[in-house]
Amino acid sequence: AQKVTQAQTEISVVEKEDVTLDCVYETRDTTYYLFWYKQPPSGELVFLIRRNSFDEQNEISGRYSWNFQKSTSSFNFTITASQVVDSAVYFCALSEPSLNDYKLSFGAGTTVTVRA
Amino acid sequence: GAGVSQSPSNKVTEKGKDVELRCDPISGHTALYWYRQSLGQGLEFLIYFQGNSAPDKSGLPSDRFSAERTGGSVSTLTIQRTQQEDSAVYLCASSPFPAAPDTQYFGPGTRLTVL
């Protein structure tokens, strides 16, 4: 069963629009960790954020913000005032301590295209 | 400091040949992971190393795949008798200490094409 679901395959916006990427996860662990990674056209996965399951505070970093809702098992990501440089594939991922190795289970990714 | 490096960046091989992919993790990182990114399967876990041992090999797709790590540093992923379905980008990641979910830092990947 898919542990991380990113329902949006592709999103296309015009520069300066806001864009929200959905992520829904599934785990039996009470403690777990959620991540967002960005993969620009160059291909390298770039870490954006890590969130612990016991910390439900939302976080903002510049134009990026994350909304963690344990009740709905969601960890959504919003880019405010998008820019062309935000064009990339964005992956949500889950790490479960019960597996003892913290390997990442990735969603399928959402391709964001920001048009000038 | 230097990030995770992988070599070669691109590898084209013929079906049936063996290939070796190399990963140099960030210095001091004890945990090392291999993932594979392909069009049909997305990003999938292959194998995890803690030091030189591999306690989780559950993601290796067949016995044609093997990996080793030496000196708690460099890791090599070997694919024997390559098949066309092995074509993918192979990503390596390292993290400082696996007892906590430290962030995994990824290398640029090796793009493998099997003709």
Image (cartoon, helix red, strand yellow):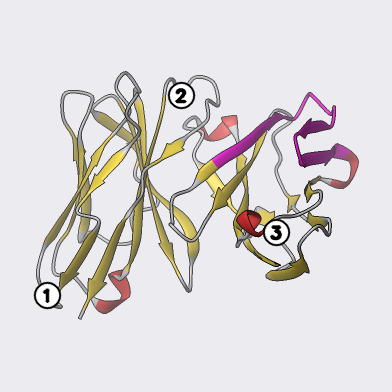
Q: Earlier in the sequence, mark 2 or mark 1?
A: 1
Identity, as a three-letter code, of the amino acid under mark 1: Gly
Structural distance between the alpha carbons of marks 2 and 1: 36 Å
The answer to which of A66 and A26 lies nearer the viewer is: A66
Magenta-highlighted residues: A47-70
* Residue B112 occupies quadrant: bottom left
Identity, as a three-letter code, of the amino acid under mark 3: Thr
Please, which chain is the residue tagged with disc 2 on? B
Up-down relation of residue A110 to residue B99 (above or below): below
Q: Residues within 10 Å of mark 2 (few under 14, many from 20)?
A: many
Please check whether the numbered discs 1 and 3 fall on a single chain.
no
The answer to which of A19 and B70 lies nearer the viewer is: A19
**Main secondary structure along the magenta-highlighted residues:** strand
Q: Classify residue B113 as left or right of residue A68.
A: left
Q: Classify residue B111 as left or right of residue B74.
A: right
Please, which chain is the residue tagged with disc 1 on? B
- In the rendered image, residue A86, in percent from the top left (x then y), is placed at 65, 54
| Quadrant placement of the C terminus of chain B | bottom left
- In the rendered image, residue B108, in percent from the top left (x then y), is placed at 36, 49
Residue holding disc 1? B16
- In the rendered image, residue B109, in percent from the top left (x then y), is placed at 34, 52
Residue holding disc 3? A5
Outermost residue toward the bottom in this view = B115
Residue at image point 52% right, 56% down? A40
Residue holding disc 2? B98
Structural distance between the alpha carbons of marks 2 and 3: 25 Å
Identity, as a three-letter code, of the amino acid under mark 2: Pro
